[in-house]
Image (cartoon, helix red, strand yellow):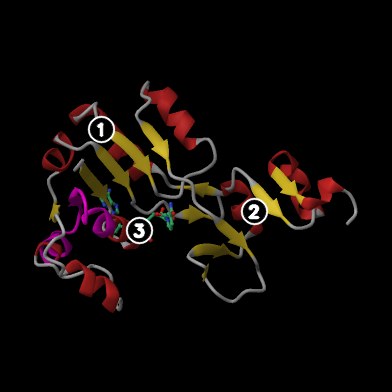
């Protein structure tokens, strides 16, 4: 069954998910940059230096349009995928989730039937908090995998973000899976899972 899916944020995450879903569903991408939206409607990718995405967006069978109009984007949506940036501020140890909150409020106002799926990186407990604060249950989080490997000089490892800041990593993760336990994880023991629980093997 074809669904109406709106993607908010036409960066890497939004475009990738949007184009894949547009193979089988009707996708509207909501952006904030008029030039980028116009280009997407001319099937020019917003992702620089990625020839594969540019090739993919030209497929005629994709049901994919971009807009700046949030009413149009939300009014008939079955799902709204939230993929805007939520930048981390290392001085406050805080993720800026303001734009995510404002999208959730807009969707709540325009279309109560839409299910919202958060792809943006948000702190632990954010989804439950926003559900309570806005008295809604139609917002869910799509889990994401992070790696902490400071000796790996790469931003990504098998498509997962490699983080260099342990405090940021610990603040972000609901569950931490580690080969061996470590003093560095003592303050977040409740979410650490390690093979050490099976004994000293
Ligand atoms: N869930 C996952 O698997 C996963 C994986 C990687 C990244 N992420 C997270 O997804 C989010 C997006 O990452 P990205 O790499 O695509 O970012 P990006 O910076 O490439 O793109 C974000 C886009 O959102 C747009 N935008 C900003 N504010 C907006 C608003 N108010 N309304 C509509 N559009 C707005 C920007 O113009 C930009 O096009 C980040 O929070 C990132 O950490 C999630």
- Which of the marked residues, 1 or 3, is nearer the chain's N terminus? 3
Q: Tell me the quarter of the picture where residue 73 sits.
A: top left
Please give the label number shown on residue 114. Answer: 1
Q: Residue 103 vs residue 143: left or right?
A: left
Q: Tell me the quarter of the picture where residue 85 sits.
A: bottom left
Q: Secondary structure at mark 2?
A: helix
Name the residue rendered at 26%, 53% in the picture: 21
Q: How packed is label 3: few (under 14 Cα within 10 Å), some, or many (20 or more)? A: some
Compared to residue 29, the image places residue 45 above or below, namely below
Pick the residue in front: 100 or 12.
Answer: 12
Furthest residue toward right: 200
Establish whether ligand 1 lies closer than 8 Å to the Cβ of label 1. no
| Location of ligand 1 given as a quarter of the image | bottom left
| Quarter of the figure with the N terminus | top left
- Label 3 sits on residue: 13
Q: Which residues are magenta?
A: 18-39
Name the residue rendered at 41%, 44% in the picture: 97
Q: How packed is label 1: few (under 14 Cα within 10 Å), some, or many (20 or more)? A: many
Name the residue rendered at 55%, 74% in the picture: 154
Q: Is residue 150 magenta?
A: no
């Amino acid at each position: 069954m074809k669904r109406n899916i709106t993607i908010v944020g036409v960066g890497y995450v939004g475009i990738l998910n949007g184009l894949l879903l547009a193979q089988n569903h009707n996708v509207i991408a909501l952006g904030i940059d008029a030039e980028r939206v116009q280009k997407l409607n001319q099937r020019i990718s917003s992702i620089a230096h990625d020839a594969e995405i540019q090739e993919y967006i030209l497929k005629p069978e994709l049901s994919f349009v971009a807009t700046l109009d949030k009413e149009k984007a939300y009014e008939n949506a079955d799902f709204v995928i939230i993929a805007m940036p939520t930048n981390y501020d290392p001085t406050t140890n805080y993720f800026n989730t303001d734009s995510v909150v404002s999208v959730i409020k807009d969707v709540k106002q325009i279309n109560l039937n839409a299910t919202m799926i958060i792809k943006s990186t948000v702190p632990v407990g954010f989804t439950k908090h926003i559900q309570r604060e806005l008295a809604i249950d139609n917002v869910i989080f799509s889990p994401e995998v992070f790696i902490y490997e400071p000796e790996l000089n790469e931003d990504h490892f098998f498509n997962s973000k490699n983080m260099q800041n342990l405090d940021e990593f610990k603040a972000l993760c609901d569950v931490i899976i580690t080969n061996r336990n470590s003093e560095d994880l003592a303050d977040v023991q409740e979410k650490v899972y390690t093979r050490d629980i099976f004994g000293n093997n």
